[in-house]
Amino acid sequence: MFHAAILLWAAGLAHWIGGNVDLGLAANILLGSIPGVLLGSQWAIKVPTRLPRNALGVVLIASSISLITK
């Protein structure tokens, strides 16, 4: 997690300096992700481990099928 956070900040800073940041889009993503993080963190401690693991597997398989068919 720490490594990913460092890379995220480095890449974000590079894009900011390069002028490649769409602030409106970034604000929309932030507004959508905050409730997801808050609800997801509460949900994750109340649900058996198997359910989120299976849900993540289904999402990964569906996205891979989508990428293959395109």
Image (tube, rainbow, N blue to C red):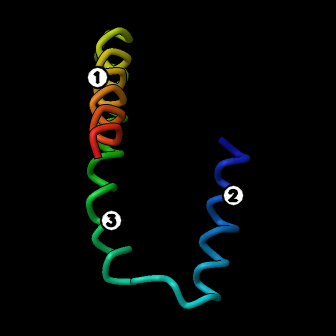
Q: Residue 7: which numbered mark, if any? A: 2
The residue drawn where x is 30% and y is 32% is: 65
In the structure shown, which secondary structural element does the residue marked by tag 3 occupy? Answer: helix
Residue 60, position as x, y percentages in the image:
36, 30
Residue 32 placement, left or right of 15: left
Q: Position of residue 9 (x, y in %)?
A: 65, 66
Residue at the (65%, 41%) spot, across then down: 1
Q: Residues within 10 Å of mark 2 (few under 14, many from 20)?
A: few
* Earlier-in-chain disc, 3 versus 2: 2
Camera-side residue: 68 or 13?
Answer: 68
Q: CA distance from mark 3 to mark 2?
A: 19 Å
Q: Which residue is mark 3?
A: 29
Name the amino acid, label 1: Val
Image-quadrant location for residue 30: bottom left
Residues marked 3 and 1 touching at CB (< 8 Å)? no
Residue at 69% in and 58% down: 7
- Tell which circle, 3 or 1, labels the residue nearer the N-terminal end: 3
Amino acid type at mark 2 = Leu
Q: Where residue 29 sits: x, y (%)? A: 32, 65
Picture quadrant of residue 64: top left
Query: Please, is residue 10 above or below residue 43 in the view?
Result: below
Residue 10, numbered label:
none
Give the residue at mark 1.
58
Q: Secondary structure at mark 2?
A: helix
Amino acid type of the residue tagged 3 in the rendering: Ile
